[in-house]
Image (spheres, grey):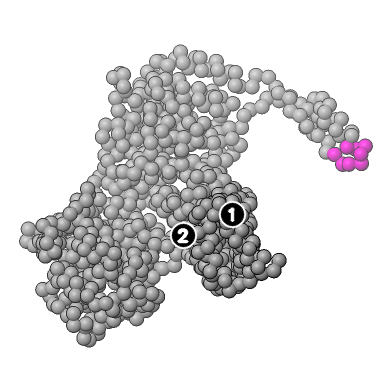
Amino acid sequence: MNESEILAACEEVLQHLEAISFVAQRDAREALPCLDKFRANTRLYWLVAARDLFLHDREAGKAFMRRTPEITSLWEDVATWTDQALVFRNWVNSWHALDGFLEQAGHVYKNLGIEAERRWFEIGLRWCARAIEDGRAFFETDYIQLSGKGGITDIEDLIAPAEQLHQSNGLSLKVYLPGALMAREVVGVSGLDPWARRGADLMRSDRLRGEAYFRLASEEGLRYLLDELPGYRLRQHGRFLQMLLLAWFDELIPLGDSDWRPGKGTPMILCDGRSLLMPPILPDREEAIVAALHTAGHLRYDTYARSEIDTLFRARGMSHPPVDEDQRMTWRPLFAEFGDRLFRFQVLFDLCEDIRIDSQLGILIPDYFTRLARVLRRAETPEGPAGYYYEYACRQLGALVEGEVLDARLVPLIKPEAKLVDAYQTALGLFEDNAFPELTASQRDMAYPPGHGINTGPAVYPRPQYEVLHDALHADAYAERRPSRERQQELPQQTPGQQQKDPDADINEPRENTSGSGGRIGAGKPMPSNELHSRRATRDTPSGGFPYPEWDYREQRYIDGWARIHEIRWTETASKRANRILEEYAGVLKRMRKSLEMQRPTRPAPRRHQPDGDELDMDATVAYVTEKRAGLSPDGLIYRRRAAQHRDIAVMLLADLSTSIMARHASGNGKLIDRVRSGLILFSEAIASLGDPYAIFGFASKHHDNVNYFLIKEFNESGLSSLNARLAAVSGRLASRMGAAIRHSIVRFEAVESHHRLLLLLTDGRPADYDDGGDPRYLQDDTRMAMKEARAMGITPFCITLDPRGGEYLPSIFGPNNFVLIDQVDELPARLPEIYLRLRR
């Protein structure tokens, strides 16, 4: 066609579009001027493509037409990107993916080149073919974020694990991509494969758990990345930092965890008016010390004092600061008047208050300015608007450190009498200076100098002025903070390994015990002292014993040597009580012994494939002759003989001897311990009749380092005349740290050569101890891990519980078929040996 015919055809397409939709022809006419510089046939081709896409999906057609001016300005090869856009007709509801493609294709072409654009497009198409939502996730993700530092190669390396995960586990790109981008930033391209393999392992065991790992929606996924982050780990050095603050501020300031995660901007220490909220890492030790001292300085110099906050709000015409449901004060009303410019003012307000605080800290702490100067010298200015604030803050702090001239507007803040309201008024003056650019929320987080952070971000608990806390009425510097000392969950979570290997070794002296001693309330759980979260010595610990690791689900790792087992030989006896039990259950014993006769071999059983015997094994003989004639060299195991066969099994009964078994029986007739003693005696009688090797141990605990393991009957122990007397004397005491007792039982099994090893755990409740922090999941998850360790060693664990609510938590520990609930306690003595006989088969 000549040009006039092409133009006529273009008009026909436009009229067709108008007949279909007024919006379609309007969008097409608005886009056409950007194509005037191209040949007529190019415009016709584009119009036909726009119509076809609109007919396929109205939204796809509109996206194509509306994105055309932008992509044309970047990439003039209209035919190429139009051809690529038409491919999206292969899928229904593909307009989101098409829109993402059109938004970015021109930029990819301009910045990475035509070959890179083609490869980028082909990757997206493969995911569209699998699931259009995955294609959408790919095309809508900023190509700059996808390409990292290596361009299209980094995109391909990023997506390669996703291809494998989709084939092996059916993982969608939409789930994989957010976590993968963060993982690459933390562990690098080379670390993506190990990260992905870890997620694949989790998906095989639990799909939801694996997907949460990839989305970074679980502590497990976050913990993996946090462990790989380089820097100074504040949690490991929490005790050092806390004692440093105690030395300079005469106050035991709780240390908690902030909600910072990789990808959430710059890590910084925050304050809620009570505690310092710490990120997992900071760049180095120097910055960590400066940040801790500076943030605590806001407490020392009353940034969060109620009287100072009230004064500030009154100065702004507000009667009192508003509080939330937790009685925390929020700063938002102070910033409301600034509207969309609030981030700009917030940074200036924080900067002014930081100058006030640092000037006072320089007087209080001799080497504070020296440390701050070293940190500032290493500062790297961020790009964009945040860099202006960053440089200004560093310049003013540097002048403060060196004793040089500050910005005249800041000079009033370094006077000793300066208050919070003065910082606010100074910030108002700076706000009028148009040299300070506008900021977004993400840019705000980059605007703070090293060791400093957002003071007016989190809601805070207003507190008394520092001088009031430390006046004559509070001569004990810890008086006001002692409740926080006992709320150990607010303190940093340290492991014993961290405590013993703390590089700040000069502070590793045992701390005075200020926590509760714990105890039982009837048949309940021990009263928590919350030592779990502190991971430090708060009392004299027993010497000796066997150290074992303990699993911490929050940190997703083992804490080496945290639990300690102390073996105690059980010597108490109660012969008269044992005789009464045997008389009371004489009928049960008689019926039980009849059942035992059925499990004991009464006649020889044939053993096949023997080297010699009483007669030929015909099947083996036929196979031997056949293989021989075939020219093979078969073995000569062609006989069978009869002999009694005994089951090769050893069993250990591990009894939970915590205080709760001393509770009164629900019927009012005696105590729960009475049924436990009877059950142990009948169990012992049953196994002794069978001749199986067996052992009976008990356990009770008081804190992680004092787990008593009672040796009642060992595998190789002979002369059992006094065993029933010992079993009749068992009693309850203390708490029940199951995981440690199970791990010690695994070691005890090492002396047994039996092929089948059965571990029976008899308990009346969930794991609990005085230092579990009131967190029922902590020791429960540790027990679950101990069960897995037992199975890995070829031991079969089985739980017998008397807890009516055992069905709520035991499936997660032992599995759905590896426990039994005895809800009628009177049945325990008879059921206990029966359960063993059933498991023995």
Task: Of the two numbered discs 1 and 2 on the same chain, state the one appearing first in sequence.
Answer: 1
The answer to whether 439 is drawn above or below residue 571 in the figure is below
Q: Nearer the viewer, residue 311 or 129?
A: 129
**Res. 363 visible in picture:** no
Q: Position of residue 787 (x, y in %)?
A: 49, 41
- Residue drawn at (28%, 19%) of the image: 668
**Is disc 2 placed on a helix, strand or loop?**
helix
Q: Nearer the viewer, residue 186 or 446?
A: 446
**Res. 796 visible in picture:** yes
Residue 16 badge: 1
Q: Amino acid at mark 1?
A: His
- Residue drawn at (56%, 28%) of the image: 840
* Residue furthest top as drawn: 587
> What is the quadrant of the N terminus in the image?
bottom right
Name the residue that disc number 2 marks. 225
Q: Amino acid at mark 2?
A: Leu
- Residue drawn at (47%, 44%) of the image: 785
- In the image, is 44 to the left or to the right of 265? right
Q: CA distance from mark 1 to mark 2?
A: 56 Å
Report the predominant secondary structure element of the magenta stretch: loop
Q: Which residues are the magenta region? A: 627-634
Neighbours of disc 2 within 10 Å: few (<14), some (14-19), many (20+): many
Q: Position of residue 36 (x, y in %)?
A: 57, 71
The answer to whether 229 is drawn above or below residue 826 in the figure is below
Neighbours of disc 1 within 10 Å: few (<14), some (14-19), many (20+): some
Q: Quadrant of residue 475?
A: bottom left
Asked whether residue 629 is drawn in magenta, I would say: yes
